[in-house]
Image (tube, helix red, strand yellow):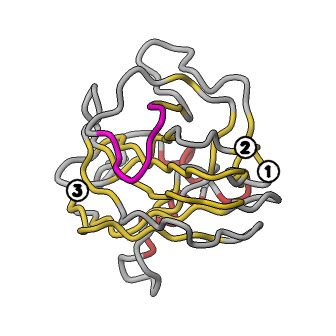
Amino acid sequence: MTVQGRFLGVVRDELALASDQARQSLAGAGEGGAFYRSNMPRLLAGADTGALTTQVMTSVPIYLRKGDVVSALTFRSGATAAATPTNQWAALYSSAATPVLLAQSPDAGAAAWAATTNKTFTLAAPVAITADGWYWAALMVKAATAPTLIGISTTASAGIAAGERNLAQTSGSALVATAPATITSPTAAATVPLVIVT
């Protein structure tokens, strides 16, 4: 059997596990929906993963395709709202070994973020993806109490096999209005927030 397009695996295996990720690729290609990608199927993101650490960036890998145009990142808070936020932004980083900042949303400052609420961070400028690969979607909130996020919790976030990426990681400290230029010295995080890229 000849496989067409970018998929190089066994078609039966892919169809047996038809996931949100497969449907996402179709959403903007004549299926009547808008473009989006996510780092996990929505069905897996049923847990309140705990609070973000104030002034520390959390990032998750997300697979993007050449030709995708990323305009916004959306996260969903869990049971805990942001209390007295002063800075909050999202950012997209490259697929490089040391990921480089591609775009950041404007700082949402003291804007409210209620519990169990989607929050969309629109990037300052859309990013046109020029190569397939694993990119990083990041979020930072500085607040008296940082919000919890919807996603999954796992003790296997750090890579197990050689070359595997962290499923989620934290980096930076004392962050305020500006995203770091690169992601350096990340630490694997046991909580993996759901992110929707549009």
Residue 48's tag is: 1
Give how far across and how far down residue 120 sits, in percent: 51, 70
Residue, x 51% and y 14% (percent of image)? 161
The numbered mark, 3 or 1, whose residue comes first in the sequence reads 1
Q: Which residues are magenta?
A: 172-180
Q: Nearer the viewer, residue 182 or 27?
A: 182
Residue type of the residue flagged with mark 3: Ile
| 179 is within the stretch colored magenta | yes
Distance from disc 2 to disc 1, alpha carbons, whole Å, reads 7 Å
Q: Quadrant of residue 147?
A: bottom right
Q: Are marks 3 and 1 in contact (CB under 8 Å)?
A: no
Residue 161's tag is: none
Give the residue number, with chain letter if any, for mark 3: 129
User: Looking at the image, is mark 3 or mark 1 nearer the viewer?
Assistant: 1
What element does badge 3 sit on?
loop
Residue type of the residue flagged with mark 1: Asp
Give the residue number, with chain letter if any, for mark 2: 152
Residue, x 17% and y 53% (percent of image)? 130
159 to 124, vertically: above or below = above
Give how far across and how far down residue 25 sits, in percent: 42, 64
- Left/right placement of residue 140 relative to residue 117 reads left
Q: Nearer the viewer, residue 119 or 66?
A: 119
Give how far across and how far down residue 185 sits, in percent: 41, 20
